[in-house]
Amino acid sequence: MEKRGSAVTLQKQHFYNDKHPDLSPLPFIPLSDMDDIALADFLPQVIEQACNAIVVVDSDDRIVFFNAAAEQLWGRNRDTVLGADISRLMPPLQDGPQSRLPGQSEIDHLVGHNVELPIERPNNTRIWAEISVSRVQACEQTMRLVVARNITIAKVHKTLRYQVLKAMAETESLLEVMNLLCQEIKRIAPEISATIMRIDASGHLHSLAAPDFPPEYGHQIDGAETDQNVSCTMAAFRGEPVLIRDIENDPSWGNTRQQVLALGYKACWSVPVKTREGRVMGALAFYYRVCRRPNKLHVQLAEIGVYLCALAMERAEARARIHHLAFFDDLTDLPNRSLLHVQANQAIAQASRENEQLAVLFIDIDRFKQVNDSLGHPAGDTLLRIVASRLREAIREVDILGRYSGDEFVIVLTQCDSVRATDLAGRLLAVLSAPCRIGEITLNPAASIGISLFPDNGRDMNTLIHQADMAMYQAKHKGSGCFSFFSGQLNQIAKERLTLETALREALFGNQLQVYYQPQINIETHQLHGVEALVRWSHAHFGQISPSRFIPLAEECGLINVLSQWVLNEACRQLAHWRQQGLVVPSVSVNLSPTDFHNLKLPHHIESVLKAHDLKPRDLLVEITEGVLMDSNPSTMKTLNEIHALGVRLSIDDFGTGYSSLGYLRHLPVHELKLDQSFVRDLDHDRATRALTNAVMHIGDSMDLTVIAEGVEHPTQRNLLKAQGYQIVQGLLFSPPLPATDLERWLDENLSFTQWK
């Protein structure tokens, strides 16, 4: 047979690369090695046996070829589609790969592209297909070759995982994540109405998400026990899937039958949500409007759905545990000092806005040390729980109660004047003095109460607690079981404060302060990580004055910015001096007050100080407190971001003691977390503290932050921290804060740090 010229040519499909959108399509390739008859016999056999669905469309958009794989993909017999318009098989394009030309058909618009489209089958099921279209030149006629493959399972996994994990990463609430999951399931399989239930600690179900149902249905389910006869409760109770193909006639369905039928649902399939350990956490339910069983797609949706449900629920539980450890007292389950301050400050702000009074009661258990010493700490713990319970029952729901420390409790009474405070203090003393049985011993506890009033005695919680504390000691001097208000007799302390403020001004402007430096050690490499600059004040009359006393004073009297700038300049000057001497000090960290970040000129000042001492931005690390996270001042984030833009590193000091959200932390440009020394102090004898320090380490790891533990005083603490993954530590175990000259000597004597190995 004489071979003719290229009567048949096939255009190779081309794809537009996302990274290279200007790539040109591949050229036409002639098939000249086979004659027309051989080619006509060969090609149909090849494409008929192909694994992918192949459809050939003529120039009038009519289907002229439909292989066996296409029959399976679309669920249609070829006899029913041959000669039909291709639009019968493909849905209208919502968002095409690029703008359509005038008069261009949808099939021509897809030439040279890969698209993912939903395919509606005749049996009312939907699948997803990846479809590509190429042109084929045959006998002077342009055909379109449509190649498709089923990507439903991959689409389900990709879509659900991406959407739900993205929502979780953005710190969406559990309810929002679960509603999103139900909506995505609906989008993939419109015949499904999904609901998600969660089991609480007492074994009752609660609705998390049911976007296709009215709120009343979720309310009816809430509180249901896991052994009640509802499909989702049975799945949770049995720990295995439950299928109800006909709700109307199934005897196992419970009280919600009529309500579900009224909504148009006739079948339900429920699957338990389990942890990796097998604990049932809830149930995912699919409701159908026809009597049926789940198909393969529904099974796949359920498998990925329950996995994502378990992941989100476990994450919510972990966050709740961390929050409880951080902000609630483990012994009494009362708010701890951190949470107490936050709640109290909110109450003070509201009282200030509404021009109301409130009272702060500082309560101390009398002779508590004797109970611990004579009966042991377990008896003391029991007494603290009894006191906490009695206090909780004696106050209103709008009042605030917290364990301040040890045997000290604080109550904030809202909308309370001195008359009501007097009445409640008397009742509290009577309630607390009631006999209680601890083991074989009957105790008659007593307490002393100090009271301060807002706004008469102070306008912030620190001041009010301080004054209530002083009033409590005055009550103790009266005898056991008494209360006392902060009075004019205590104003002597205020006078001393004024004297101290004057002395601080003189010390600051007279260069009487001194900067000490405490080394930070890498316990893995036994090398110096950096030094922290700490201001110290020794006064001729007052003696050595603690920073915890004069730094808050500086904040209150408006000297904190001057003090911070002085420390910053002195620390940078000293680092530059060490560098000139050849001493290898990697960096210096300086503590700044939250008030400092209200100053928009702070970044410029830091930049100027670094340039003045010929230092790089990486040589300085600025430490901030968690209070910055909650600071509503608009200048704060602007200042933080500008400091970060300079290249100066940021560290959150005393991490774990504030009331901050990880959502806030996620948006801060921080490089380092400093575990508060209060956790380190209790590390070797408190299990909850170890859990919290471990959680902080994991937070740092997950966010790629350096975590430093401060206040390490004993080898046991160091070893526990090292076992949890901490590498950088500081504390008295290695060195106290030292003057610059003493630190130089210390560095020379401890260059290799071999004594800590």
Image: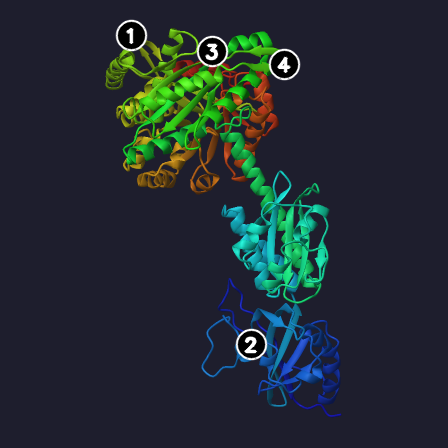
Q: Earlier in the sequence, mark 2 or mark 1?
A: 2
Relative placement, left or right, of 328 versus 193 is: left
Q: Is label 2 or label 1 in front?
A: 1
Dot 2, crowdedness within 10 Å: few (<14), some or many (≥20)? Answer: some
Residue 398 shows which numbered tag? none
Instruction: Name the residue furthest bottom.
Output: 2
Q: Amino acid at mark 1?
A: Ala
Q: Earlier in the sequence, mark 4 or mark 3?
A: 3
- Label 3 sits on a secondary structure element that is loop
Could you tell me which residue is drawn at 47 percent across and 32 percent down? 673
Residue 37 coordinates in the image, percent (x, y): 74, 89
Q: Is label 4 or label 2 in front?
A: 4
Return the residue at label 3.
366
Residue 111 shows which numbered tag? 2
Return the residue at label 1.
540
Q: Amino acid at mark 2?
A: Val
The answer to which image quadrant residue 459 occupies is: top left
Task: Kindly indicate whether the residue at mark 1 contacts the one at mark 4 (C-beta within 8 angstroms).
Answer: no
Q: How many marks?
A: 4
Q: CA distance from mark 4 to mark 3?
A: 20 Å
Dot 3, crowdedness within 10 Å: few (<14), some or many (≥20)? Answer: some
Q: Is residue 757 visible?
A: no
Q: Earlier in the sequence, mark 4 or mark 1?
A: 4
Residue 439 shows which numbered tag? 4
Q: Earlier in the sequence, mark 4 or mark 2?
A: 2
Q: Quadrant of the N terminus?
A: bottom right
Q: Is label 3 or label 2 in front?
A: 3
Q: Amino acid at mark 3?
A: Asp
